[in-house]
Image (tube, rainbow, N blue to C red):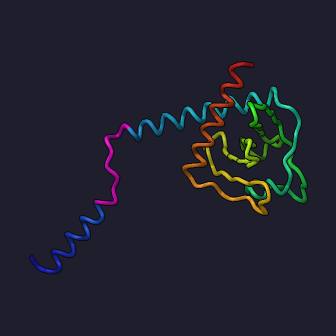
Amino acid sequence: MSATRWAVLCACAAAFSLVPVTDGRSSIRFQQEAQTTVAALQSIAAWLEKSGEDGWMGADVADTLEILRFGAEQSLAARQKAFRTGETLHLAQIPVDQRREFVLFMVKGPDEHIYFYLSTVAEGYKRGFVTGPGWAEVRPLDAAAGERGFRDEVRYWEGIIATR
């Protein structure tokens, strides 16, 4: 076999090793989970719009989460609800201003860490962050931890809505 043919075969083998092999079920399951999450976020946002209380988000939080501010806004008006489960505080917010679209979940656990899970109704989970006592900064969560925490919060809020 010539060196050129060998190089081509090696390149093809390497390329095929990068192609994920699935039976199609995982792709379908992912699509179903995404549709379920979007439906849940729509329900949560509608409930917050109807039953939420007036609140706000500070400019520093908006900037960290990369939420658009207009002009010199120092805070963003929001509709929000908060519930405590044991030592854990859960808060959900949506913007009042229709030019913005997000659902933000914040969770403060007994360890005093605060987790932020930013999503949109249309696209689902976007990104997550965490801060803790004595930290000077907010740190991004890795994708898997952020997605897991986000899904936990969606389930938490679905449960809250179901009992109200």
Task: Tell me: residue 140, above or below residue 50.
Answer: below
Q: Nearer the viewer, residue 101 or 116?
A: 116
Please report the residue visible at 68 percent of the width from the left and 46 percent of the height from the top: 117
The span picked out in magenta is 17-25
- For residue 128: magenta? no
Image quarter of the C terminus: top right
Horizontal side of 60 relative to 35 (left or right) equals: right
Horizontal side of 1 relative to 129 (left or right) equals: left
Task: Tell me: residue 79, above or below residue 13.
Answer: above
Q: Position of residue 36 (x, y in %)?
A: 55, 32
Q: Position of residue 22 (x, y in %)?
A: 33, 45
- For residue 23: magenta? yes
Magenta stretch secondary structure, dominant: loop
Q: Quadrant of residue 163?
A: top right
Horizontal side of 32 relative to 85 (left or right) equals: left
Residue at the limit of the structure toward the left, as seen here: 1
